[in-house]
Structure formats: C-alpha cells, structure tokens
Image (cartoon, coloured by chain):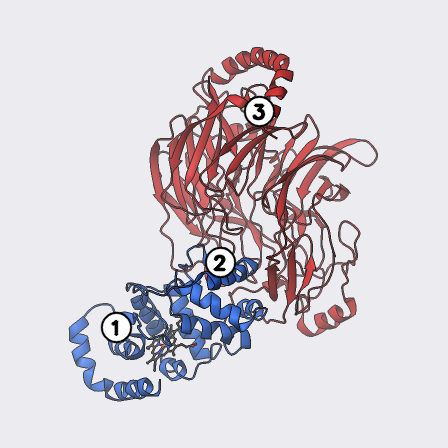
Amino acid sequence: MIGRLLNFILFVTFAGATITLADTNTGDEYAPVADLLKSCQVCHGDQGASTEQQYPILAGQEFYYLYVQLKDFKSGLRANPIMDPVVSALDKDQMQLIAKYFSEQVWPDTEYASDDQVTRSAITVITAGQCIACHLGKFDGDSRVPRLAGQHPEYLAKTMLDFKSKSRQNSPAKGSLLASFADQELINVAQYLSSL
Amino acid sequence: MGNKRINNLFLNLFVGWCIALFSISSVQSQEVGGGTLYGDMLTVTQDMLDRAASDSNNFLHTNGNYKQTRYYPARQINVGNVDRLQRAWTFETEVVESLETTPIIVNGVMYVTTSFNHVYALNAETGQEIWHYKHDMGPITTYCCGPNNRGVFPYGDKVYMGTLDAKLVALDAKTGRLAWATQIADPELGYSETMAPTAVDGKILIGTNGGEYGIRGFVKAYDADTGKELWTFHTTAENSVGVWATKDATGRDMLRDIRAEKAALKKLGDPYKTLGGGVWQNMAIDRETNTVYFVAGNPSPDLYGAIRPGDNLYTNSLVAVDLSTGKYKCHFQYIAHDVWDLDAVSPPILTTVVDDRGNEVKGVLHAGKTGYVYVHRAKDCSLIRFSEPMVVQENRWVLPTPEGERMLPGANGGVEWSPMAIDPNLGLAYAINLHQPMTYHVEATPYPGGKLWLGGAFKVIAEEQQWGNITAVDYNTGKIKWKVKTEQPMIGGILATGGGLVFTGEGNGWFRAFDSKTGELLWQYKANAGVNAPPASYNVGGNQYIVVGAGGNVQLDYKRGNEIIAFKLGR
C-alpha cells in the first residue's frame, strides 16, 4: 500500500510534465481529467479494472455511486487516509467526468468462489437484512446502489466492517444494519458476493 | 385440497352453472355488440372513465374504476366454469425483474409496464406486440424496494406513466411516441415514481415515493395536455405537530414520550421539510363531491422518532383533498409519530357502508400495514370501525431499540401496497396479507441528504416461519368472513369479478381463483415466476380474459420473470 501511495505521489508530482501528452492522446471528453484518470489507475488498475484485493474495482461501477463516493471522500463522510488526498483538489465537474469514465469501462472477470458453508451463512444474512430489496437479485447495482457482484472480497469485507465500526459513515442506514451482524458473518457475505 | 374437492364442488354447482350459461349469452351479446358500450373507442373519454365500474370490455383504471373497487362486472368466467380457464397467450417482456403492473385494456389494446419503465402496447386478443417504449432513464434514480412500475393511465389519445427518475411522461397511445415529459421532483433528494397516475377532468394526479429518504411527500395535479403543474398538496403539513395522540386507530398505546418530544420540538422546530409521507398508490375519486382520497405513507426517518417530534401530520393518514384545487378537506391519522413503518399504503376504496347507527353512508375502506381493514365516513374521514386483525399481532407497540425488538406485523406490514378488491353485493373486502416476524432497531441518525434514511434497521428473523393469507372482511361488521392461508407472505393484489370469483397470485408462481363467498379454491395455474402483480380482466372478441403479470418480486425476493399471461375459457 505504501509503495502504491509513493508511486501515486511521484505520479502527481510529475503529472505536469505529462499533461500535453495526455491531451493530445485522448482529445476526447475525458481530456480535462486525463491525468487524474492515470493517477487513479496506479492503484485501481488499467481502466479501473483493479486486480489487487485492497483496491475496489471501479470499471463498470455505477456512475452515480462513484460520483457520490468521491464527493463523500472529499467531505469526510467517508474518511479514508488513502483516498482523502486523492480527491481533495477535485471539483464537481472533474468528479462527474471521472465517475462517468469509470462507469463506462468493462467490469473485469474475477473468479472468486464461495463454498457451501460460507454461502449458506451469507444467504441467511442477506435474507435477514433484506439486502436484495435495494441491491437487486444479481447484486449488480443501479444508480446510487453499487455493484457488489464480483467485487474483491477483501475490499468488500473491509468496507462492511468500516460501516459497522462507523469509520465509513456515508450511508447511515447501512451502518445500523451491518452493526447487527457478527464480523465473520460479514466476511462470509463478502466472499459470497465476490463469487456472484 | 385437490382436484377431487374441486370436482365435487362442480357437481354441486352444476345447476348454478346452467343458470350462469343462460345469463352469459345475454351478457355476451351486450358486451360484444360494438366493442365498448361507451365512447367512440378511439380515445379514452371522461365518460368512459366515469362508467368504468360497469364496463365489461375495458379495464381503464389501475384499480378498476375511480372508486378503486377492483370489482370487474363481467361474469362470463364464473364459479361454474372457471375450471375451464386456460392460458390464452403469454407475452415476454425484455426486462426480467419484478412486475407490479396492472394491465390496462382499451378496446382490445393492452398496455403493460415493467421495472425500469418499459411500456408495451399489445394486442389483447393475441398478445402480439404493437409498440414498445423504453424510457430514457436519467443517471440518478433513488428508490427503495425495487425498480418497479405499476402501470399506465389511459386518457384521451395518450397513456401516462411516472418514472423512476421522477418524471411524468405522456405517450401517444397509438405509437408509443413521447408526447411530453415533465420533471416532478429531484431524484437526487430521494424522489421517484412507481405508481400509475390517475387522470380525471383534464388533470393527471400523481404522488411520490421517498418515505425512506427524507422527502417531503405530495400529490400533484398536472395539465393532461401540456404537463403544466396545476396544484400541489403537501402530505407533511407546515404545522405537522397535531394533537399529541397517544393511541393508534385501534386504541393501543404507542408509548410516546410526549415530554421529550415537546422539548425536541422547541429545539429543532417543525420537521415537515424532510418528514416523508410518500403517496405511491392511486387515489380514489368521488365524482359527486369532487374529492380525492389517498393515503400518505410513513414519516422519515422510519424508526428514529426523536428527531421528528409531534404527530407528523399527515403521514400514516387517509387524506381527502378537493380535486379542483388540491385544498385540504379532511384526514384521519392511523398512527401518530410512527416508528415502525407500519404506514398507510394500500389504495383506499370508496363504497357504501353501514355506519355505527345502521345507516348506509358513503364510506372509504383502507387496509393498513397494521393488518386491519379500516372503515371511514367519506364525509369527514372519521373512523366508523376497524376489522378484526387479519394477521398475528404480537408485542405491538414495542419501541425499537438498538439491539432490536421483535414485533408482529413485521415492517412489510400485514398488508403491503397490494390493492384490495371488494364485492359490493356481498359487502366483502378482499385483502392479501403477510406474516413476517421482524426485529425493529433504532439508531439516532441526522438527515443524510438524499441517502437512505431509516434511523435504524428492520431485520427479518430468518429462523422464524413466514406465511400469508387471503382474507375476506365484512366491512359492514368488521368480521372476517373467510381466510385462506398461503405458503408465503402475499404481495401484489387481487381482483373480484361479477362471476363470483377472486383472483390473486403468490410468490411461488401459483395464480389462483377462489369463490368470493366462501374462499373455496376453484382454479389454479402455475407460472414460471412469482405472480405478484394485481390482476385485471377484459373482453375482446366475445371472450372474457383474466390477465396478470408474472415477474416475481424483488422486495420479498420471489423468483423474477418477464411474463404477461392472459387466460380465457377453454372448451
């Protein structure tokens, strides 16, 4: 993680030098955020199709969800030491453009699996929490509700535990609900969701 | 109960069947004649809409007619022959997700909608597609409980639909082309539309979803030709405090801490701006008195009441307003300062009822999420009676705690949004019920600016058994006449017909017909997905049809599908 952060800082430091290049390369609607997008991909992978567990997949995620997260990182509602410096200088237009870019990329194939016992435990939690009422049957998201299917389990577990401990506060109803489950149950749910 | 019982029943009913046959032929000739009896058949006139309750050819209103009786007068399909009911056709929509649409039938053309706001016009006799409209959904939608839509309303040469991104759209009924669209409210703040609008006297009436998002609820009227807003009635009054009621409509103490609430009121002021009170089912309209009756939903946040002191008027209420102006006429609040989300959703029904002095008066019926049928005087909204409870009541009203308190009914209610039907000849109201034990959890939560705002959580107790009922309630006495238990909690709706039948579907895919007098099972069909939409009926080419959507339900996670299925009598 530290290594990534360093790379990111180096990237940002030298970003000025690459601006002209990026502009001429893309020349599309994303030109104004081309460098920013590159900086994101240091951690979140090419086109946001992250291959490392601690960095959530952004490629193909819901536009409005992504935009709200960026806003919430910036306002501190979703405090995160890694993302905070990343978003601190972004304005609303940049956030929307970045969110749009990632939402238009293709969600990568992740090949996570969930065994019977984990699946059973997860489904009990999902039933009790009526998760499907918002996340829909395939957990593929819609607008402000994120796609969870196929997301990295390590990240999903961390973020659910963050909701539970209230270090992630940008969806209060989620905090109340997840607080009523045991850590291991949430870890099982993460594993199961990643396998969908 | 198997086929044998059904066969026996038919032996018994043989005589009745013969009689029915005779009456059918006369009904048929009357029904078929020149298509519909009223209007020029090209456009939906006000006259047709006003006469819908006796129209055995069309199905023009989501709930049958302006009184919302869901009583369809045709009796070609009846207790004596319903065993011969067969699938006539199936239409598969493009969207495999919850179907809550009531098919609307205008002179042999059927309009159905799906989740995510697709609209189809179909040939009602064959199920062939005539046109398909896909709403161009904006990037921001905020809804709870599924991307549902409950149908269009036909009026003039257009059909009208509310959308998930909180728009009202008018489509050309012949082509499906968009005539106009108007933004009703801001989806970023939690507003969305799932209900079918209601059209009357040149106005399109529509409410809003959003009781889980801290919206300010309303009913609005738009000009049917232009989409211009005509009036708004806000369901959260600027003075929402009320009378500090301590008991609910059934007389149970709600354990309010009035002193603490009064202190909070001083400190926080009136909470009306983010108080919820969604209206997301159709309104009943009394054409004689020019009055609109609707129910307003739960206060926001659902479970955390300390932040919204007072009775929270007019949440959880039956409300009547003037059709021309939107001005308040009367209201009745079922649960003041609700902290259980046991609100008022199922659409109200206007009918003649017997009051407590034995006089016949104009009444309003509503099935509460509490699991009671409430009977009101239309004149002043006052309560005449409430029925016996249709579902198990346990621990009501325990206050939610951080750890969670078990209570029945669960938060999806004893009756959900599902419309009731009545048989005015029998004086019975038919409701479909849920038994879903839940725990209610509270957590202090400030307004989160358009995000899901429950102020806690509802949890289904996964180990406990769940089930449903179909219940017939005598609304003139409040007594339960009959009750049929179902395997799963019920959601969708019900239709009563002049043939002495009620039709309703279940999450497991069964679509069933019961004798409306006795609750006897007379016919059933197994669909490929949950049948969780309100059925409709119509007549085309001399045949009466029953039609229903089988798309399952996302809220209760019943198997999703994409079928519209029409039935008619076989040989």
Q: Which of B430 and B225 is in front in this view?
A: B430
From this viewpoint, is residue B186 visible? no
Secondary structure type for disc 1: helix
Looking at the image, is mark 1 or mark 2 earlier in the sequence? 1
Q: In this view, does B102 lie above or below A130?
A: above
Q: Nearer the viewer, residue B355 or A15?
A: A15
Secondary structure type for disc 2: helix
> Which lettered chain is shown in blue?
A
Q: Report the side of B176 relative to B222 (left or right).
A: left
Q: Report the side of B67 relative to B114 (left or right).
A: right
Q: Report the side of B271 relative to A73 (left or right).
A: right
Which quarter of the figure has residue B67?
top right
Q: Which chain carries label 1?
A: A
**Which amino acid type is marked by label 1?**
Asp
> Which lettered chain is shown in red?
B
Residue positioned 57% across, 26% down in the render:
B3
Check if mark 1 and mark 3 are on a common chain.
Answer: no
Secondary structure type for disc 3: helix
The percent position of residue B432, horizontal first and vertical second, equals: 62, 41
Q: Report the side of B220 relative to B161 (left or right).
A: right
Q: Quadrant of the N terminus of chain B?
A: top right
Residue positioned 56% across, 43% down in the render:
B282
Q: Mark 2 lies on which chain?
A: A
Q: Which chain carries label 3?
A: B
Question: Where is mark 1, residue-wise?
Answer: A46
Q: Which of B381 and B321 is in front in this view?
A: B381
Question: Where is mark 3, residue-wise?
Answer: B54
The percent position of residue A141, horizontal first and vertical second, equals: 41, 60
Mark 2 to mark 3: distance in Å? Answer: 40 Å
Numbered badge on residue A134:
2
Which quarter of the figure has residue B447?
bottom right
